[in-house]
Amino acid sequence: MRQVSHRPDSRQIATSYLMVLLLSLWPSLAQAADLEPQTVAAFDRYAALTDAEFSAELARREPFLWVEGLPKDDRAKVEAQLRAGEVVVERLETLDHGRPIPAPGGLIHRWIGTAFIPGATLAQTLQFERDYDHQQEFFQPNVQRSKILRHDGDDFTIELVFYKKEVITSAVDTEHAVHYGSIDATHAWSRSHTTRIQEVENPGETNPRLAPEGHDRGFLWRMNTYWRFEEKDGGVYVESQSISLTRDIPTGLGWLVGRFVTSVPKDSLTFTLEATRRAVLQRVAAAH
């Protein structure tokens, strides 16, 4: 009778080794990182320059969208991708007189993404965007809770609880001040900034505990978002860009934490635009 070997294969050994290593590193990953004043100052400078850039672009009106300012061949390629249903996301960087803005103890991320929603109107798109009380229904699992705390005309204060699970699980309870603006019947915009960010220490439990602001694992310390909406080509182009501040990557843990910290802003923006496109398309279909 042929004997069956029960020796673990190389993949099992590697998986077991990784699990042991993760358990040994977990105290370092769970250790809080303090948000320092110089890190906040760097983000505030970055945000002020990005804000000024956004306002100047709105004042110019043309090009209104990022894609409209691309070279001709690149623009044609991206617009074809958008009309095919893809979401296009690119990394940007805000410079201070041509120089990068260092953020000691932190990392600043800036991403811009665009989606095209065929058949949609600007009014339908904005109605969805402003319906914060129900957005968790469309942005699960990344958004665990969404709620309007205050609303006065074009100004909203909202609560969003973000959730992300990869190698590391994180949940962050946030409040945002949001303002909408309209240029004409086919162009609108919004901008928002976080007014409170606290990591949830025990996500999923009945009575979640919130870590002190600026004293957590540092997966999200600040976030500003900028949206533009343009109705044309038989639908609506939705553009969103975000700047966010996270902790720096702990020494020696770049191979593990680095991808989590640096990929979350891009992945979250992509997911948000994809979910927005699906949700508005559902409303378009229901209207017909």
Image (spheres, rainbow, N blue to C red):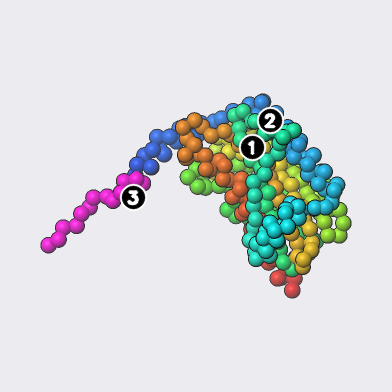
N-terminal-most mark, 3 or 1: 3
253 versus 268 height, above or below = above
Q: Which residue is mark 2?
A: 42
Q: Which residue is mark 3?
A: 11
Q: Which residue is mark 1?
A: 108
What's under tag 3, amino acid-wise?
Arg
Residue drawn at point x = 64 percent, y = 46 percent: 91
Answer whether labels 2 and 1 touch (C-beta < 8 Å).
yes
* Residue with the most extreme left position: 1
What's under tag 1, amino acid-wise?
Ile
What's under tag 2, amino acid-wise?
Ala
Residue drawn at point x = 67 percent, y = 59 percent: 78
| Residue 11 painted magenta | yes
Tell me where residue 188 appears, x and y as whole percent: 81, 54
Between 52 and 130, the one lying in front of the other is 52
Estimate the spatial distance between the alpha carbons at disc 3 and disc 1, rounded to whole Å: 36 Å
Q: Residues within 10 Å of mark 2 (few under 14, many from 20)?
A: some
| Residue 123 painted magenta | no
Quadrant containing the C terminus in the rendered view: bottom right
Q: Is residue 53 left or right of residue 242?
A: right
Magenta span: helix, strand or loop, mainly? Answer: loop
Q: Residue 170's image quarter?
A: top right
Estimate the spatial distance between the alpha carbons at disc 2 and disc 3, rounded to whole Å: 44 Å
| Start-end of magenta stretch | 1-15
Answer whether labels 2 and 3 touch (C-beta < 8 Å).
no
Quadrant containing the N terminus in the rendered view: bottom left
50 versus 115 height, above or below = above
N-terminal-most mark, 2 or 1: 2
